[in-house]
Each structure stands twice: as C-alpha cells, then as structure tokens.
Image (spheres, rainbow, N blue to C red):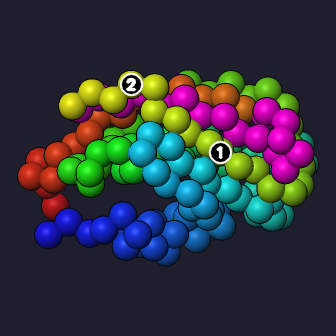
C-alpha cells in the first residue's frame, strides 16, 4: 500500500538530510512544490555566504516534491541531470525554492526551479531532469 502524500511529506521533513539542512516543505500540489530553508550558521561557507550545495539540495528537493505531487505516488523520482545557475549570493534570512514541472512523461519529468531570497530576489535558477523509478523496480 502506498503512503498518502501527507504522510510522505511528514516522512520527508523527518528524514536525516532534511533535518541536517533544516529544510521545510511548505506546499506540494500538481506540478508544483515550494520548499524553504531559514539560513543558519551551518549553511554558510568560507566566503560568508550560503554554500551552493545548500541551494542545489533545496532546488533538487523542491523539484522532486513537484513530481510526487503529480505522479500519484507511483514511483520515486531519481535525479538524472541537474543544471544550476547561481545568480546572487545570500548571507542570511530565508531561501525559498519553487519548482514547476515543465514536462511530465510516463517516466521522464523536467522541472524548472527558481530559488529566491526572502525579499523575492532571484538568487539561483535550475533545470532538473528526473526518471520516475516505479515502485516494483525499487531494489532494497
């Protein structure tokens, strides 16, 4: 039996990686998801700005949730390719990633993600391709 989307979201936020980054799932619906991170000292790198890996993880996760919201929970989205443009550094506040599916095939999804600071300025842009690994194909 597949878990409900609400149960899956709760499990996602309780996962060790989301806890490590203090990532919050704010909204998930058909072809869309919004996730956020309130910047803490642990997110800051040597140049005193948020590490690009934090923003890439946020973008990747937001896109995956947009797929969960659109796939009837028939599988697990696995990242195939990710392009990330970092446009502006951020030092504090909150970063928000909004993902929109721009292609939804039976197995391949492509998501467009914008990462913004808490003033609404675009700080990063990502295009991510996923393969939907069907439930029966998952090896444990």
Tell me if residue 134 comes above or below residue 23 in the rendering: above
Q: Is residue 46 magenta?
A: no
Query: Does the CB distance between marks 1 and 2 fall below 8 Å?
Result: no
Cα–Cα span, label 1 and label 2: 18 Å
Q: Is residue 122 magenta?
A: yes
Q: Quadrant of the N terminus?
A: bottom left
x, y percent for residue 33 = 53, 48
Q: Which residues are magenta?
A: 107-123
Tell me if residue 11 comes above or below residue 115 in the rendering: below
For the point 29% across and 45% down, the residue is 71
In terms of image quadrants, where is residue 107? top left
For the point 70% across and 58% down, the residue is 37
For the point 89% across and 45% down, the residue is 119
- Element on which disc 2 rests: strand
Q: Quadrant of the C terminus?
A: bottom left
Q: Nearest the camera: 21 or 131? A: 131
For the point 21% across and 31% down, the residue is 106
- Element on which disc 1 rests: strand
Count of marks placed on residues:
2
Q: Nearest the camera: 3 or 129? A: 3
Tell me if residue 103 comes above or below residue 49 in the rendering: above
Q: Nearest the camera: 21 or 2? A: 2
Mark yes or no: residue 19 visible: yes
In terms of image quadrants, where is residue 90? top right
Q: Which mark is residue 18?
A: none
Dot 2: few (<14), some (14–19), or many (≥20) neighbours within 10 Å?
Answer: few
Q: Which mark is residue 103?
A: 2
Q: Extreme front residue here? A: 30
């Amino acid at each position: 039996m597949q878990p409900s989307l609400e149960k899956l979201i709760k499990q996602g936020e309780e996962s060790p990686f989301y806890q490590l980054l203090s990532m919050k799932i704010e909204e998930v619906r058909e072809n869309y998801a919004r996730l956020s991170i309130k910047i803490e000292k642990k997110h800051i790198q040597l140049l005193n700005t948020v590490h690009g890996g934090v923003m890439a993880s946020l973008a990747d996760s937001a896109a995956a949730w947009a797929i969960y919201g659109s796939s009837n929970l028939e599988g697990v989205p696995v990242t195939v390719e990710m392009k990330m443009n970092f446009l502006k550094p951020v030092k504090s506040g909150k970063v928000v990633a909004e993902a929109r599916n721009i292609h939804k095939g039976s197995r391949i999804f492509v998501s467009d993600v914008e990462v913004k600071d808490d003033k609404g300025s675009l700080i990063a842009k990502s295009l991510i391709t996923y393969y939907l690994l069907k439930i029966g194909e998952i090896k444990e």
